[in-house]
Amino acid sequence: MKILKINGGKELSGTIEIGGAKNSAVALVPAAILSDKVEITNVPDISDINALEKIVNYLGVQFVKNDDKVILDSTNLINKPITLEQSKLLRASSYFMGALLGKFKHVEIYFPGGCSIGARPIDLHLFGFEKLGARIINDGDKYIIDADNLVGADIDLSFASVGATINILLVATQAEGITTIRNAAREPEVGNVVDFLNSMGAKISGKDTSVLTIEGGLELKGGKIETIPDRIEAGTYVIAGAMVGNNLKIAKVIPEHFASLTDKLLEMGADIKIGKDYILASKSNNLNPVDIVTQTYPGFPTDLQQPITSLLTLANGESTITEKIYENRFQNVPYLIHMGANIKVENQTIKIKGPTKFKAGEVITTDLRAGAALILAALCAPGETTIKEVKHVLRGYENIIKKLRKVGVEIDLEDV
Ligand code: UD1
């Protein structure tokens, strides 16, 4: 088991550079197999990318990584069933459904893995595939999806799902005629995938809006994309700066992508300055409580809900967070309480009464962003905190040990 030891209570100063977005990169790699040879830059160094490398290698794709640049050559791509083990490696394994269905009109795969934060069904993905002409055979966790012909369609999503929007996009580029996706997710990561597919020769319009129109059936060749900066990684470190920073600079970001977070921090009276491509954050002793509701983009992201809970523990008064996206995303709460927070869970809302002081302790990470929340609490707590099961964190935060050490954190990763 991988554990983190953090000696907290110290100020953080200096610069943290943000890497490429996990949620973009994990879609860009499966999307790459729709073309022959592509280049993706600013790819984050995280274990989710290593998992995807294994899956594309299995499919006969050459994956060559040099620093943050990945060249994928799918000239010898073969369609093989994605195994149960591969499917469970991460949530984004589901993008092989769209990519292989589009490319071969046949895919065999299992229900995807990923953080256990709720049921996370894939019904909207399947609804879109069926609209485009696919037949689905589902036996337990296994899916066999076939099509004689893929034909463009008008697809109205009942929820603006990121995964469904991207997966349907992948198939729609290969379907004859025009596809329209209504109530499409507007997350910046979707726009990054749209730019990538268009660089291969696809014709997709409506980027960053809730209606995407795809002229399908065009041959996709080549392609080049830069992964956008990770707005969730950036947001996590901005929160760290607001908790224990002394002019902590979070660099290489697109502040507009996490304006819902910085708006809340300003409402709290946090000491942050927003630059063109950076944020400066410092600790403030006078933070107001706020109410937060998680929403789809451009609303407050569910992925920053757990991290900001740690900051709200320091605010003067009662804050609330209502989680609207996932039904089981408060697993960090018992551990934050163990470290001194005063939090009550009432259905999908938590009430955080501050200010309380974090104290060091031994806690367990249950999922990626819960881990980030515990790290933030540990940065504040004087003494040594041990965080177990940090493999979840390493899936999504690149070089987190190196980045935190550089700004003054005493942190060690141990394998026990
Ligand atoms: C992506 C992100 C994840 C983020 C989430 C919401 C990746 C790899 N992960 O996950 O970090 O928390 O967006 O911003 O990009 N839903 C259905 N049926 C479906 C699909 C989704 O009911 O077919 C529901 C889900 O259960 C959830 C909500 O829609 O309640 C949001 O899911 P979705 O936007 O699809 O998230 P993911 O793509 O899984």
Image (tube, rainbow, N blue to C red):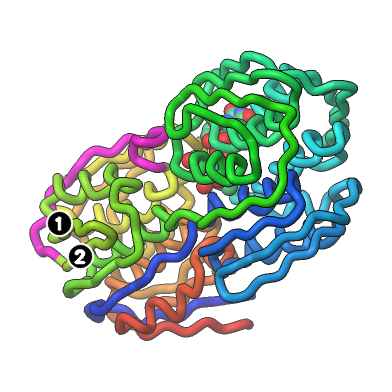
Vertical placement of residue 34 versus 282, above or below: above
Would residue 340 be counted in the magenta stretch? no
Vertical placement of residue 252 versus 351, above or below: below
> Which residue is identified by label 2?
281
Vertical placement of residue 49 versus 79, above or below: below
Q: Which residue is pictured at 46% across the width and 73% down the height? A: 400
Mark 1 lies on a secondary structure that is loop
Magenta region, residue range: 284-301
Q: Are marks 1 and 2 in contact (CB under 8 Å)?
A: yes
- Indicate the position of residue 166 as horizontal and vertical percent values: 60, 36
- Indicate the position of residue 337 as horizontal and vertical percent values: 36, 58
Residue 260 placement, left or right of 25: left
In the figure, residue 345 lies in which quadrant?
Answer: top left
Crowd band around label 1 with a 10 angstrom C-alpha radius: few (<14), some (14–19), many (20+):
many
> Which residue is identified by label 1?
270
Q: Amino acid at mark 2?
A: Ala
Residue 221 placement, left or right of 337: right
